[in-house]
Structure formats: C-alpha cells, structure tokens
C-alpha cells in the first residue's frame, strides 16, 4: 500500500474533490510536517500565508529534499508557490487579488497535468503568484496578466496555481472567511457566485484527472522502488 502525506495550511482544511482520487492519505495540520522516509508521495495544499513567511521555511526545505529524492510531489496554490521557492523560482505579490475562473489550455505534454477534461476551467482565489524556476516546464498557457499557471520541475514535482480540489462546501467557507477578497479582486459576490454555479459541477472531473494521474505516478514509482 502506498503512503501519501498531505500538508494543510488553511484554518478550515479540506480535501474536497481530491479525496476520492488520492485515496487514503496521512494529513498534517498546524505546521506539522511528515518525514519523507517511507513516504511514496507528498501533496501541499493552499493557504492564506505568503510563501516567504519564515514559518514556512521548514516546509520549503522539505519540498526541496523531496524534489532531490525524486519523491512525487504536487503543490496546489500556496503549495505550488512553495515548490517554486524550493527550486529556485520566484514568489510575487499580485497587483490585486485574483478571484476568477480561467480556462486551462495545455501547452506541453505531461503525465499528471496534461490529461485534463476538454474545456476545463479552474478556480483562482489568489493574492500571490510565482515564476517557475529555471528549467521548469510550464504545462498550461498563462491567463491574462501573465501569471504562471502550472509547471513541472525535475522528474516528479508539479505545481498548480489554481484549486482543482475545490468543491461547493469549500467555496462557501471562503466567502464566509474572506468576504473582502471578492471586492478586492474587483468583482462582486453575485458575479463570482454565478461563475461558481457554472463551473463547480465540472471540478470533480478535473480533480480526478490531476490527482488521479498523480496517484498513478506515486504507485508506479513505489512499485519500481520496491521491486
């Protein structure tokens, strides 16, 4: 049986649509980190922190070690920003908050991020972004504004700026927890909710595509390592 550890950063942590494709995972909360020894895969989810927060430095070091070991890693939103930081990329504060559903356009072949449903849209709820490290492969076209969307670095590390795992309950919690975010992003709750209603029903398929592909990589790598 493979071991996948998940690192949460939100005060209201969730797996959402990622739960089914990931299967049984070890969840870590409140700044606690797993040991990489004996792990087959590692996922780092989003949060309201900045990637350059000194409190996250131990996680940056852990991610750097995972990449060096070629342990499969997937970073989502803050997790992707931490992956960029751990591998020589850049973290940036966006000119303003970004709350938007954006289409995903695949521009490079990739076994984890490349096989997404046709017409897929992804939810962004961001204050920060990132530039991938030198040598990284960007998998998706950048949306308007030039933000990096998704990348692979090394052999088995991936990061996405958006939230494929999001479900309705998570979005409701974000509106309740950050009511100012929508206004600061230059939109309205009514418009944002209308976009949610249009795209949320498709998120289970997007999540299954990405997290399912990642889980298959984890299992294949584990079989190879234990052969």
Image (spheres, grey):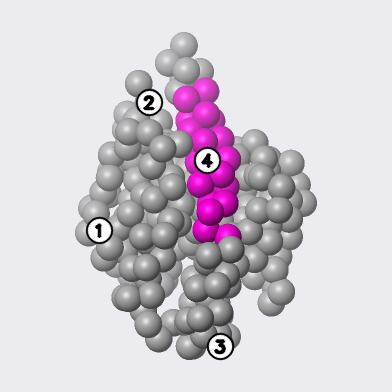
**Of callouts 3 and 4, which one flags the residue occurring earlier in the amino acid sequence?**
3
**Residues at badges 4 and 2 in contact (C-beta under 8 Å)?**
no
Q: Nearer the viewer, residue 207 or 48?
A: 207
CA separation, marks 3 and 4? 31 Å
Determine whether label 2 and label 1 are within 8 Å by CB: no
How many badges with numbers are in the image?
4
Q: Earlier in the sequence, mark 2 or mark 1?
A: 2
Mark 1 vs mark 3: which is more N-terminal? 1
- Tell me the CA gap for discs 1 and 3: 32 Å
Q: Which residue is mark 2?
A: 2
Return the residue nearer the eye: 95 or 179.
179
Q: Say if residue 30 shows up in the picture.
A: yes
Label 2: which secondary element: loop
Secondary structure mostly taken by the magenta-highlighted segment of the chain? helix
Which residue is disc 3 drawn over? Answer: 186
Which sits earlier in the primary sequence, circle 2 or circle 3? 2
Residue at 74 percent across and 41 percent down: it is: 109
The label nearer to you, 4 versus 2, is: 4
């Amino acid at each position: 049986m493979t071991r996948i550890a998940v690192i949460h950063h939100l005060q209201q942590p969730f797996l959402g649509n990622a739960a089914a494709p990931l299967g049984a995972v070890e969840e870590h909360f409140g700044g606690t980190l797993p040991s990489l020894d004996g792990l087959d895969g590692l996922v780092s989810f989003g949060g309201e922190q900045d990637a350059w927060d000194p409190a996250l430095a131990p996680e940056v070091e852990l991610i750097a070690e995972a990449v060096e070991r070629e342990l499969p890693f997937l970073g989502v939103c803050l997790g992707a920003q931490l992956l960029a930081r751990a591998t020589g990329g850049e973290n940036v504060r966006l000119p303003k908050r970004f709350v938007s559903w954006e289409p995903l356009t695949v521009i490079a072949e990739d076994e984890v991020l490349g096989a997404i449903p046709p017409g897929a849209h992804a939810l962004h709820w961001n204050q920060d972004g990132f530039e991938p490290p030198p040598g990284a492969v960007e998998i998706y076209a950048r949306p308007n504004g030039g933000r990096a969307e998704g990348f692979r670095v090394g052999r088995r590390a991936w990061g996405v700026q958006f939230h494929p795992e999001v479900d309705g309950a998570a979005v409701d919690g974000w509106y309740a927890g950050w009511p100012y975010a929508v206004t600061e992003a230059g939109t309205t709750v009514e418009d944002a909710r209308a976009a949610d209603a249009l795209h949320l029903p498709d998120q289970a398929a997007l999540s299954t595509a990405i997290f399912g592909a990642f889980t298959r990589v984890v299992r294949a790598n584990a079989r190879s390592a234990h052969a």
